[in-house]
Every structure is written in structure tokens, then in C-alpha cells.
Image (cartoon, grey):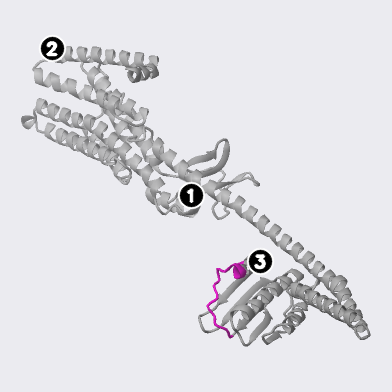
Amino acid sequence: MSAIAARMGAINPSRVVGLVAGAIGVVVLAGLAAQVDAAAPGASVATTALDLAVGLAFILGAALAPGPWRGRAVMALVGVAWLAAPFLPRAPLAYQGVLAVGLTIFPTGRPRAATAWLLVGLAVPVLLVPAPKPLLAVLFGAVAAHAAARAASPGAWYPIAAGIGLATGLALSWFVELQPDRYDPLVWQVALELVLLAIAIGFAVAMRAVVRARAGLADEVLGDDRLVGVDGLATVLREVLNDASLELFRWDVEGQAYVGLHGNPAPIIPAHGWMVVRDRAEPLGAVAHRALAMEEPAIAVAVAQAVRLALLNVRWRAALDLQLADLEEARGRLLATTDRERAAIASRLRDEVVGPLRRAGAGLSAATADEANGDAVAALTVARQELEAASDEILDLVGGVPPARLGDGGLVEAIRDLAAGSPVPVSVSSAPLATGTSEAETTLFYVCSEAITNAVKHANASQITVAISADPRLLVAQVSDDGVGGASSSGTGIQGLADRLAAHGGRLRVDSPPGAGTTLTAEIPR
């Protein structure tokens, strides 16, 4: 009961009043028509009932059919004019003109092309002046031809069939009238009423089919697997809506104008349908089209939703790409700063710690030359050995750190210094002018240092080769060994090198077939 009460509370009172008044009017009109029809010469219950059925079918069909109210109102007027025909002299003329208009504007409820406006203009005189049957047959034939030209639209079969049926019936009736001995007015009147009854019933059926087709069309727009990017969406919409002229435009915030997907400006005055797509109050883009299906609210909403999602995705991706670029630049700057600080610390350790330790060790060596005190000599010897061991450990610790200033060709000399301390022979070669910026050479130094260390520790290599080369854009370091191979590119060490290169716009390739050695190739912008 509560659900029923809620629905009753949601009903618009003015609409209820309008429906009741309309129903009363139809009942009164039908009663008058029945009374006049029954009093006509030669009338029967069957002919009177059929006459009433035609008018009521148009009115009820328009009331029960979904779709735009304008088209339904026109078809309801056909029924009103038909019921009023027995007692209003102009009504028999009116229903023919109104029906021609209703079939022309089906299913959108409004004329959409120049030919439609022409047909509506031709139908208006029929409302006022009696037209011969041949002229009416031509008018309804033109209505059918107009609908046939748009046969791809949902429900186009209805105005085609209705126009052909009326045109054929009117032409045959006129032809038979020319032979009075073969013409029976009652037979042709009944035939006309049966055709009109079929048209009235067909209107509701056709409108429901149009709504279902367009609802399915909306699902097809949103459910197509090819909705990849704005270009893919435009292609899908052209195919689904059968509109090759359809074009999408995006809103250029900086230029405050609509532009095409490839930068072309939108027309100043669109020559056809123009649907603006917004995100809240902010414009995102627009759809220029000639598709009749866009008159259906469900389809227009589906298209707007698909375009909105596609354009928002483009905007979000652009913002994300900008943020990623900023993050990559920040990461590169952070790595460069860290490398400079690490190199400075290594330089200070060499100069300010290892140097004094070496000098202290040399002093202790001189002191041990005096063998007069054996205990003191032994203690000094241990101290000297510990100082030398500490110096070696510090040098090993900073051995993988490049010199504080690299760039303009200092990389090759730094790698040769690094290779001098390797237990495995390392050959270093460089192509002419294979130089880069400080950041580029520092990054490749770390790659070469890590690759040499891995080859010594894990590859069981007997020879390591480092080759430095360059092209106009890239500085390249290639480190090869003749070890066991099988190195994994997903290992933490190699992945760290790849990340370091990526932070500066470079990349790392690893070629390490089992048993055939390993080759690391690092490329970085110069």
C-alpha cells in the first residue's frame, strides 16, 4: 500500500486533470459522431462501429505510444478530425492533411530535412481546400518516397507502408470512380477505413519498435569494444548512427574554442545538428551530426555519456602525462644531486681520510725500523696493518663512485681507473667523440661499474669488455663478458640500473643466454 501511495503522491495533479478532460472530450466527440453516423442514409451498426473505431484508434494509439509528444499529438488530431467529420464540414479535409504531416515527421515529431518541410507545406492547403484524389495520391506517394530515402532510420517501414497504402487506395478509388457502373461507394469507404485503422494501430506499434531500437542503439554505442580513444569513438558513432558526416570536437581551454581531433577548427556556424557535451557546467566538446536517431533522448544521452567519458579520459591522461613528466624530471634531478653528493663524499674520503691514514701508516713503518724495543715494534706493526686495511676498505667502498666531475669525455678514463682494480681483465675502448653531459656519463659509469662487479662476482668470467660509442642523439655503453650467462633482467641490481637510466630518458637491454656470456647495453641521451 505504501508503494501505491508513493506513486499516487508522485502524480502531477494538473496532468490528471488534463487526462480526465481529454477523455471526456473524446467520449463526447465519439458520441456525437456515432449519433450523426447512425442517422445517415444506409448506415448500419457495423459501418458506424468501424467509423468510430478509426477515430478512436488514432487517439488511443497516440496516447499509448511512446516517443516525442509532437508526433503523437499530430496523430491524435487525425482521430479528432475523423470523429468530427460527420458534423463539421471542414473536418473530412483536415484529417488527410494532418495525416500527411504526421507521416512526414515520423518518428521525431518534427521535420528534419528540406524535403520534409516541402511536404508539410504541401499538406497545409489540403486542410483548407478540397483536393482531388489523384493529387492526394501523389502527396502520400511523396511521403512514402521521402521515408524510403531515409530507410536506414529505425521504424522507416511505417511511413513507407502507410504512404504506399494510402496512395494506392486513393489512386484505385479514383480510377474506379471513372466507371460508375463498377463503383460502390460503401465498399471503397470500408476499404479506406480498414487502411486507416491499420495505420492508426501501426503508429503505436512502430513507435514502440523505434524506442526499442534506439534503446538498443544506445546500448550499442556504450557497449562497443572499439571505444578506444576519441578517434575510435568517432568511428563507432558514425557506423552505429549511420552518419558518415559525424564529427567530434573538443573544447580547447587555452584558445576558448572547439577544435577537431586533429587540430582543425570547428565551423563557426554548424550546418547541421550540434550537441554540446559538458562536465558539470564546463564544456568538454561537441558532436556535429546529421543523425535522426539523435532526436531520441536515450540515444542523445548515451552519445553524450560516451563522448564525455572519452574526452575526460583524454584530459585526465594529458594531466597524468604532465605529472609523470614532472616526476621523471624531479627524479632525474634527485639522482643527479645524489650522485654529486656521493662523488663529493668519496673525494673527501680519498683526500681527507685515506691520505692521512696512508701517511700515518708510513710513519709507523718508519718507527718499526728501530728494533731496540721488540714489544713496541710488534704493536706498531699491528697498528700499521690495521691502518692499511682501513685504507683499503675505504677505497673499496668508494671505488664504484665516479669522480666528482664527469662529462666531455671523462667517462672513459674513469672506467679505465675502475678496471685497473678488477681481478678480471677489463678492456676499455671508446669511439671518437663519444662524449656526453655530466649526468649522462655519470649514469653510464654506474652501469659499467655494476656490470663489471656482477661479472666478477657471479659470471665466472675470464674477460670483460667495455665499449663506449655514440650517435647524434645517444651515448651508449656496452659491457660484455664471457661468463656463464643466464642473468635475469628482473633482478634488483639490473632493475635498479634500468630505473636509473629511465630517470634520464635512457634504457637498458640485457642479452644473457645461458652458457654464452652476458651483454648489457645502456643508452642515454647525450
CA gap, disc 2 to disc 1?
62 Å
Horizontal and vertical percent position of residue 315: 57, 48
Sequence-earlier tag: 2 or 1: 2
Horizontal and vertical percent position of residue 269: 54, 42
Residue 480 visible in this rendered orientation of the protein: yes
Sort mark 2 into few (<14), some (14-19) or many (20+) by Cα contacts within 10 Å: few
Q: Spot the residue most to the left.
A: 181
Horizontal and vertical percent position of residue 172: 15, 36
Q: Which mark is residue 247?
A: 1
Q: Which mark is residue 500?
A: 3
Magenta-colored span: 482-495
Amino acid at pointer 3: Arg
Residue that label 2 marks:
39
In the structure shown, which secondary structural element does the residue marked by tag 1 occupy?
A: strand
Sequence-earlier tag: 2 or 3: 2
518 horizontally vs 6: left or right = right
Q: Nearer the viewer, mark 2 or mark 1?
A: 1
Q: How many marks?
A: 3
Residue 466, quarter of the rendered image: bottom right
In the structure shown, which secondary structural element does the residue marked by tag 2 occupy?
A: helix
